[in-house]
Image (cartoon, helix red, strand yellow):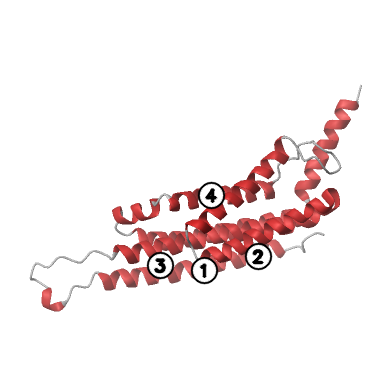
Amino acid sequence: MTPHPGSHELVTFAAALVLWAAGGVLVFLSWRQRGHSAVVPRSSRGAGVAELPPDPVAAAGRVDVALAVVVAALSLGAAAIHLAAAGEHAGELGDLALGFYFVAAFQAAWGVRWLARRGRAMAWVGIGGNLAIAGAWLWSRVLGLPVGATPWHPEAVGAADALCTLFQVAIVVLLALRLRGVDLAVTRRVRDVAAAATIAAVPAIGIVVIATSVAVSVAVSGHDHADGAAVHGAAEVGHAAP
């Protein structure tokens, strides 16, 4: 199945449009909130009263939400890529290809759950699950799977699966930093980190959306698989030639 011509450009344009609009809104809201926090009561002007520092609890909450949205976007993006690749692998892996659907369901469900209820237990589930999925991908690229058309033959690394693995590694790193309290430590030391994190989350999500759309398009069209099969076939011909 090949994507309709121009569909990729339309998805990219829509993602960029959402990115610009959301970025403008967040910049405006952050500027407005900062302006309100900098207002000193009229009765205290000229009385030597210093400006009150921002609430560290509220700032930590904004940083936590910004990071949570980015992590959820990465998990949903990885789920979309696995779902797109499931159909391609069904013919060569048989029932084992159902694992792609299970992985996609896990990553989608965990990403939504992480937005609604964050905690140490959910963080460890995300770390363990994504490490296991990334480990299975590494095994298939180094040693090969024991089933399929070419058992124990390493698969070629494609753009879509490499990007998906990068998403999973990023999830693990961000969750590990959160468990270590790095986000709270930065919030206490950097004055405007809450506004910066909120604004930075917008381009990060935009990049994830655009990269996911490209990876899904590649996975559905089967370009990575076709390229890998061509390379493998050329190598076998080369070895067979006298």
Q: Nearer the viewer, residue 163 or 153?
A: 153
Q: Nearer the viewer, residue 145 or 220?
A: 145
- What residue would you read off at disc 3? 27
CA distance for labels 1 and 4: 19 Å
Q: Nearer the viewer, residue 201 or 111?
A: 111
Q: Earlier in the sequence, mark 2 or mark 1?
A: 2
- What residue would you read off at disc 1? 116
Label 1 neighbour load within 10 Å: few <14, some 14-19, many 20+: few
Horizontal side, residue 67 vs residue 103: left or right: left
Q: Earlier in the sequence, mark 2 or mark 3?
A: 2
Quadrant housing residue 219: bottom right
CA distance for labels 2 and 1: 27 Å
- Indicate the quadrant containing the C terminus: top left, top right, bottom left or bottom right: top right
- What residue would you read off at disc 4? 172
- What residue would you read off at disc 2? 11
Look at the numbered disc 3 and give the secondary structure of its residue.
helix
Look at the numbered disc 4 and give the secondary structure of its residue.
helix
| Numbered disc in front, either 2 or 1 | 1
CA distance for labels 4 and 2: 28 Å
